[in-house]
Image (cartoon, rainbow, N blue to C red):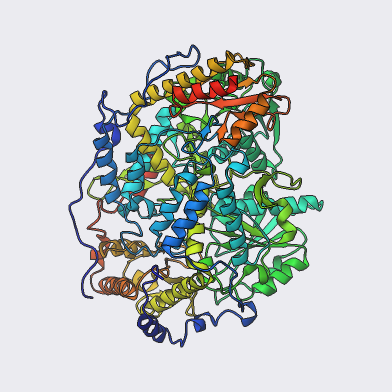
Amino acid sequence: MTEIAGTTGLILNEPLLWEKGKEGREGYSMPRRDVPVVPLDFGAAESSPDIPDLSEIDVVRHYTRLSQWNFGVDTGMYPLGSCTMKYNPKTNERQASLEGFAGAHPLVPEHLNQGILRLLFELQGYLCEITGMDAATLQPAAGAQGELTGMLVIHAYYAAKGERRSKIIVPDTAHGTNPASAALCGFKAAPVASSADGLLTAEAVAALMDEETAGIMVTNPNTLGFFETNLPEIAEVVHAKGGVVYCDGANMNAVMGIVKMGRIGADIMHLNLHKTFSTPHGGGGPGAGPICVKAYLAPYLPEPRIIHDHGEYRLSEDFPQSIGRIHSFMGNVGVMIKAYSYIRTMGAEYLKRASELAVLNANYLKERLKGAYHLAYDRPCMHECVFSDRYQAVRKIKALDIAKALMDFGFHPPTIYFPLVVPGALMVEPTETESKEDIDRLISAFLAIAEQAEENPEQLLESPRKTKVRRLDETQAARKPCLAG
Amino acid sequence: MRYFPHTAGDVESMLSVVGRHSLDELFSSIPPSCRLEDKLDLPDPMTEWELNDHMNALAAANTTSENGKLFIGAGSYDHFIPASVAALSGRSEFVTSYTPYQPEISQGTLQAIYEYQTLTARLLGLETANASMYDGASALAEGMLMALRLSKKRTIALSRLIHPHCQGVVRTYLAPTDCTIVELPCGTDGRTDLSPLKGRTDIAAVAVQSPNFFGVIEDLETIVGTAKGINALTVASFTEALAYGLLQPPGYFGADIACGEGQSMGIPRIFGGPALGMFASRMEYVRNMPGRLVGVTSDREGARGFVLTLSTREQHIRREKATSNICTNNSLCALIAAIYMASLGGTGLRRLAQLNRDKSEYLKSGLLSRGFRSVFTGQTFNEFVLEAPAGFSRTYRKLLERKIVAGLRMDRYYPDLKNHYLFCATERHSKADMDALLEEVNA
């Protein structure tokens, strides 16, 4: 290893906002008063809200210092499995901040907002093309809301047929959002285990699939990083009993231009624009979770829908079977503008290349690390690979310790303890925007930690040492919750 | 392609490590019958310069307060956003990080969200707030689900004066459940009529919005009292959070849950999203709250730090028994709101809220003196409904041609309110703008 990416630097402390405010300061240029005061004679509070007064420089320093305690993709490699922390292009930010978008009001008559409606309409088309589906809605504000929308669509589809189904098959490798979303629609999750090679089988699904079951929620590629090769057969089993195949597209970054899920049996699919289509994760959102569906489910999509006729784009609520609204307006449009910019920048050629390089990076990392770390399933992976802490655990070093140690080397840790089927999981997703050199540095860090676990495990328990704070006590936070100051 | 750092040599050497001859071979685990043979049918890649031109053209084909005049709010408000708010919230350490699962290198997001929770709780007069929901509509829907969980009853009362889109989302969320909704109509003062609640014992929660969709400030004291009288929770919603710079907050009157839209707090309208679901409740209900929560703790050397907490409520632990399915929320929007509130301070929020009230009163009195008729007697904040004089619809259409949107037609949402319009004026509408509109209305 040539040089460790992580070092120390001058990090400034910063109190809480209300520890530094002083009445009489202001950080805002109050617009001129050009109209008389008309006091409220009902409902007014006697005094101002209890929010500190600060000057502009107070606010600027406060948030600048806070930002310096954060690690983002722009800081360094962020191989958080299942989250696709790829580079977020700056041009996308520029486009979304154009006044013509940022200042657009959602209830202005449609002929006055043709630019944005065209963009959204075209984006729906691109997403349908990428997934092999027939229709789309952009309204869901995140992947989980996309799942909920998908479940509501399935529920409405059965209701229209006069059926009520009570269960849905969810693999044991699924994200927690899957069963939680299904439960909101009254579907009880029927768990199906993956086989010894980390894949679902048509037989296992057939054993559960019946006329009481609405269908299956399947993540493809799955959370172990494998392509569900049996999806066409599984879809046949589900369809034969009148069921619907929901595909969680959280991992679409692996197969853009390589597989269209709609062609291999999926009926509904959500996409995470903040993962696959490069929009930033914002410290936990906003994301966007559009869903794409086959034609037979289109009547149930949320309203309003964007219609293009006679050269004009308009919003229509003329869909009597629609599940209704899922968002205050049209969803997280700002995120959609960035995803649109990305797709227009990439085109078919570079989207496919992105998937190829994402898969190359993950396989390269897997090959280089597999001796030092236990590989849960040793077979070719897609865009991510799942190791475990099994080798290190004999020295009492857990996935958590490995994660914390990586911080001192200058990397964001991978996802840990997920998927649940791999005890002590370390789920690594490098993404296509990381160079060979940076991946080599990450590999060196992992190898150094494995070595330390053998030779000097107690040292690892001390990590991280170079971060703003040392290891934090999460139990204390939950035992006596203090959620506001 | 500038986003890929791989040289041809890199690709070759990496392929040799994984024992493959080509990028295509990396996908050999996918059955050939699943593989796409043709290329995706997408437009050719654009250079950055071409993209700028293309996006400039799309952006120019929309209407904003820079190329037009919009006198509408209805859940999406035009407020001035200081340069400092945009610059700070745009710092890439905030923008390009994710949910702070690893707190030691996410203290910036965590402290900022802890502060956001605090400012939100204080603004709404409640003890605790979560780290954000998607928008006002999903916040309200989640508030109703929470109230249903708490009360174990199966009926909710929903004011007809809640933003119709938010009512719609509540209905969508509840459609697959066995819950029923009682509608509370509009009284002559433009406030919610509580009379359908009389004698009922089956109501889990009473949901209202204040200021409501007509801009009228609801009588939260009476609403909370009525709800308590029938052993129901009060869910107080809002679409104009800035109003609470001036109004007594829902918590002051004893509301159990306050949830609504925080877009006014420094977030651009951007065609309605991303915005901000603000969600606050009494501390005793915290274990039933949806969404992420940030709490205080200390590190092993005793230094103060912040972590995500009470996560046993959440989907990644509790799965189908979680209090919500939410994972990614609208954290960056919560950050923006915190920076905005910190920039104004309590003093500034109150002054700005009063200015909003005054601007809208100026516009209201001008319209009233030009043949518009007041319909509701209740006090309003920065929006109000008026009945237009005969012939206004022609003027309205002619103004639209010049990108002047003189109010929102109400019959779209309330068919009985023909020829009624919902107007909004904020600090962004100068007296000159309003005088110009009044002039047009006269003509």
On the image, the x and y values in percent for residue A448 come to 26, 73
Q: Residue at 23% x, 65% y: name it.
A: A459
On the image, the x and y values in percent for residue A436 come to 34, 75
Q: Residue at 42% x, 21% y: name it.
A: B355
A263 vs B302, nearest the viewer: A263
Regarding residue A180, the answer to whether it shows in the image is no
Q: Considering the image in quadrants, where does the N terminus of chain B appear?
A: bottom left
Q: Considering the image in quadrants, where does the C terminus of chain B appear?
A: top right
- Outermost residue toward the top in this view: A41
Figure check: A68 above or below B73? below
- Outermost residue toward the right in this view: A162
Left or right: B422, with A468 as reference point = right
Regarding residue A5, the answer to whether it shows in the image is yes
Figure check: B29 above or below A57? below
On the image, the x and y values in percent for residue B4 come to 39, 71
Dividing the picture into quadrants, the one containing residue A122 is bottom right
On the image, the x and y values in percent for residue A238 come to 72, 66
Figure check: B237 above or below B85? above
B81 vs B253, nearest the viewer: B81
Dividing the picture into quadrants, the one containing residue B412 is top right
* Number of numbered discs on residues: 0
